[in-house]
Amino acid sequence: MTGARRRVLAAMSGGVDSAVAAARAVDAGWDVTGVHLALSRQPATLRAGARGCCTIEDANDARRAADVLGIPFYVWDFSERFASDVIEDFVAEYQAGHTPNPCLRCNEKIKFSALLDRALALDFDAVVTGHHARLAGGVLTRSVDAAKDQSYVLAVLTPQQLAHAEFPLGDSTKDEVRAEAAARGLAVADKPDSHDICFIADGDTRGFLSRRLGQQPGEIVDQDGTVLGEHDGAFGFTVGQRRGLNLTRPSASGQPRYVLAIQPKTNTVVVGGRDELAVDRIHTAEPVWLGEVPTRRLDCLVQVRAHGEPVPATVVVIDGGLQVDVARPQHGIAPGQALVMYAGDRVLGSATIGSAARVPAVTP
Amino acid sequence: MAYLDHAATAPVLPEVVSAMAETMSRVGNASSLHSSGRQARRLVEESREQVATVLGARPSEVIFTSGGTEADNLAIKGLYLSRRDGDPGRRRLLVSAVEHHAVLDSTDWLAAHEQAEVVLLPVDQLGRVDPAAVRAAVADDPASVALISVMWANNEVGTVQPVAEVAGIAAEFGIPFHTDAVQAVGSLPVSFQASGAAALTVSAHKLGGPAGIGALLLGRGVSCVPSLHGGGQERDVRSGTLNVAGAVGMALALELAEARRPELAVELVRLRQDLIEGIFERVDGAVLNGDPVDRLPGNVHLSFPGCEGDSLLMLLDARGIECSTGSACSAGLAQPSHVLLAMGADERRARSSLRLSLGHTSTDADVQGVLDAIAPAVDRARRAGAA
């Protein structure tokens, strides 16, 4: 036993990224143990396409990779925590008219909370994952592969959580990761990327929600309150959504209409033209800062969805939350989404969006 | 390194390795008529006779299978179908709640596809089937019972079942009785003839033989619907080219295990008690699962309240101690043990358990290795459990 050797727990999903991340942790000379998180209570035997995860096949793929790397491997059951902290949260957020990001919640509550706590208690120093992001000295930065960057879904982590995280893939592109997996003889080298929400295997979020929440018929109205149609549950809609409204009356202008707001108390969906979606002032809940807490207004970039474009913004702290004025109007910003602040590629912090509005133009 | 997972699989005896290597270098197909075939057949039949002798059966009662799981499947499905076909009213399957999944999942399959009605026989908190409960379940409607199956000894908690009494009840009502003796053979005296069972499952790799071969001992007068169809081998009950080297290895392992059993059992009980008592001295709150006396000589099964068995397993593995949280079949994806749940344990206790199984390679040093590692491992796992 070399007492000083860094002991890390590699979270291995069965995909190529986490397998290569674990391999690099081994190369770094760390004492690596692989763990697959069983998140589904009733895992399917085989994967079906790119959707879903946590099948027995995924667990076996992860085990196979661990065997090739020569590291111990275990499957840990986190299905209860996942059900309560991610799936229930997801359903409750939609019911409240919000648009949650379950991957972000899984990082926050499962991988870097439930799993990390257990790892630390078992005398590990850190959790290693295959996320595409760079982390050095507590500074979280976008991956060099902009298309695969996952800093957005990690920005919710606190400095304390990040202090025990390792993301060995941040300096590599996905293509490089796949090539490395092949060179290392890892069978997952050409396994398809997973997409969408892992616990909704068929990709039908609205169907999933209505199975959980039942039918809740309500009205679709315009901004004047005129009833334009009906729906089976306001929870099935997201701000900015255009498809699936099934409106019976065409708009006066003939232009398509979008969901502008969801009013959970009255179970009403408000729709309007695309211009009505534009907002330039966002209010958030209490932020998480990765570095120093700014004492005055902060000019930075903000990103409001997982693969969204960063836009310049001015941020001030008001009543513990943030008021964010974006330089260009944004469309389809929904409460519940995360707002992540960047300086260039560096993550400054994040906060959950509470509301967004159009600030009337002020003549100078 | 301490290997304490003999109940999952035992190290193959060196004599068995040699005999199998020798056999594999020269066998033919035991169903062929030429000289190589005759030689192969002779080896198979000698092996069958050896197995029969060791287990108190007649050679014609030994049906070689690919292992314990297949033998259990064959017995449960084959006897059920035969009985039901003989009388459509006989659909009830009486099985203990602590059977191996090879039995339980077979009965579930019959319920799903062949209109079987599964009656789970309850166990007490030591994991023991109450013969009175068996009698009561039968007496409900004796004519509707297709089969009774109760294992000889439990693979997880080691409790030895009252198979003689259950077999007696079955005989009284003229119902065939099957027993899964995979864990018992090599550890306890097992005689097919004396047991009163119509069918008995045995596996080679739990006692120093190779994986991939086992047998169903099937009484000569017992009718069993085959599940593998083909060349008609094994009394036409189990078709398939015979695994000659496997049969040789199994027969030799059984013979050696039986010859060494009386002495080994005494030694294993001593090691087992040292292990149990040593753990009790070192760990507060440890609970022994299963019958403290009437248990397999090499079985130690404990719950460590406040721990996740998974955490404990990992910590011990890191110290070179190899054991398991349950049966190896469910290892991998953690499910609380159906055996412990049937014994009345709650899910938390079920998940906090560890099985350490001793066998023919076990030593005092293995026991000491566990005793040196267990207290700090439990402490740490308890902290992780609280995390």
Image: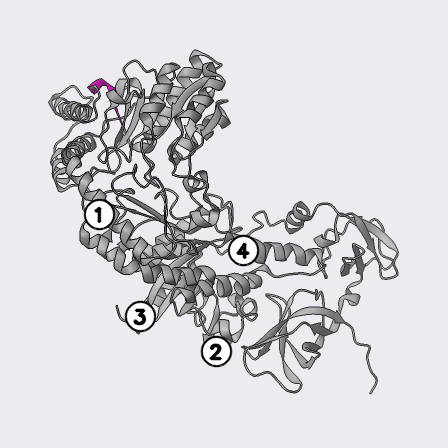
Q: Amino acid at mark 1?
A: Leu
| Label 2 Cα neighbours within 10 Å, binned few <14 / some 14-19 / many ≥20 | some
Identify the residue at image location x=59%, y=54%.
A87
- Front residue (pair B387, A87): B387
| Label 3 Cα neighbours within 10 Å, binned few <14 / some 14-19 / many ≥20 | few
Q: In the image, are marks 1 and 3 on the same chain? A: no
What's the chain of the residue with tag 2? A
On the image, numbered disc 4 is attached to which residue?
A82
What's the chain of the residue with tag 1? B
Q: Secondary structure at mark 1?
A: helix
- From the viewer's perspective, is B340 left or right of A283? left
- From the viewer's perspective, is B58 left or right of B128? left
Instruction: Please state the horizontal and vertical placement of residue B293, each as a whole percent of the image.
Output: 29, 39
Quadrant location of residue B315?
bottom left
Query: Which numbered marker is on residue A138?
Result: 2
Q: Amino acid at mark 4?
A: Phe
- From the viewer's perspective, is B293 left or right of A119? left
The quadrant of the picture occupied by the C terminus of chain A is bottom right
On the image, numbered disc 1 is attached to which residue?
B271
